[in-house]
Structure formats: C-alpha cells, structure tokens
Amino acid sequence: MQLTKPRSHSTAFSLVELMIAVGLFAVSAAASIGGLIRMNHNAALSRLQTGASTLVQNRIDQILGDVPFSPAKSQIPPVLEVGTQTIGSSSNPTVAVYTDPASGQVSVWGWLISTVADTGALSTRQATVSVFYQFRGQTYSVTMDTVRTPDE
C-alpha cells in the first residue's frame, strides 16, 4: 500500500474572489443609499404638503365659520368680501409652511391667495384658497374650494 501525502488546499479567499465580493457590496450599498435619499426627499415633500394643506384648511374653516354672513343686511365678514386677498408673494413669502420642531425655526415660507366670488344665486359665495411654496427650486401648491351660503 502506498501512502500519498494529502494535497494542501488553500482555505483562504483569492484576491479575485475578494474583489468581486467588495464590488457587489459597493453596488448594493450605492443602490441602498440612493433609495434612502429618495425616500427622505419624498418624506420632506409630504411634510410640506401636510403643512400647506393645514394652512388652506384653516382659511377654508375661517370662510365657513366667520359670522354673521348676511349680504341682505350688509353683514359681510372681511374674509368673504368678493375679490382676491393675498398674504405674501413669491418674491416675499410670509406664510410659514413648515417649522422645524427641534429648533422652532421656520424652514419653508409660502404665500396664500384667497379668491371669493359671488355666484349670483341666493348671495352664495364661492371661495378658492391656494397656498404656494418653493422647495429645492421648484414651486408647489395646494388648492381647495368651498361654497358659503348666508346665515339667514
């Protein structure tokens, strides 16, 4: 019987295998970071959309709740006067859309445009309220409509 020496097999990874593993890790890390950055951007847009929606809804609530509203008795709240009311502008935004909860500083400013029209039927007013704001060089807006009838 002849005894042969067992061959010595290297149990370590070769340089090529190691480079392939590092390359795969780098590609997956880059894809993950890109996805996380996009998710963060979308979360910021959602926060701003929520803030602008709240501002618009507050103005709608003011339009619907301001009393007395009776055009026949010349009792018309300022918020229901026919015409366009603007708070701030694109060049001078004065409406706080988002305030950082940690610092209390307003980080995004916007402007509000409220248009009230007389529908001609039973002194009913139709109102359109919009809030505009800019984020990362792009202008966004939220718009809502409502109708208000006299209190009588």
Image (tube, grey):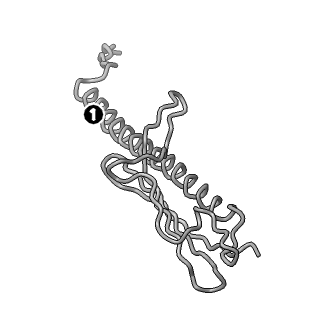
Task: Report the amino acid beneath label 1.
Answer: Gly
Looking at the image, the residue that sits furthest to the front is: 73
Viewer-nearest residue: 71 or 116: 71
Q: Is residue 132 above or below residue 15?
A: below
Indicate the position of residue 145 as horizontal and vertical percent values: 56, 70
Viewer-nearest residue: 86 or 59: 86
Q: Residue shown at 68%/78% (left/top)?
A: 72
Viewer-nearest residue: 133 or 43: 133
Q: Is residue 1 above or below residue 72?
A: above
Q: Is residue 140 above or below residue 122?
A: above
Q: Is residue 13 above or below residue 105?
A: above
Indicate the position of residue 28 as horizontal and vertical percent values: 35, 38
Looking at the image, the residue that sits furthest to the bottom is: 121
Query: Residue 73 vs residue 102: left or right?
Result: right
Report crowding for label 1: few under 14, some 14 to 19, many 20 or more residues within 10 A (C-alpha). few
- Quadrant of the rendered image containing residue 41: top left
Q: Residue shown at 56%/68% (left/top)?
A: 81
Q: Residue shown at 35%/15% (left/top)?
A: 1
How many marks do you count on the picture?
1
Look at mark 1 in the image and give the residue it sits on. 23
Q: Which image quadrant: the C terminus?
A: bottom right
Looking at the image, the residue that sits furthest to the right is: 152
Indicate the position of residue 58 as horizontal and vertical percent values: 61, 55
Callout 1: SS: helix
Viewer-nearest residue: 77 or 14: 77
Indicate the position of residue 83 as horizontal and vertical percent values: 48, 70
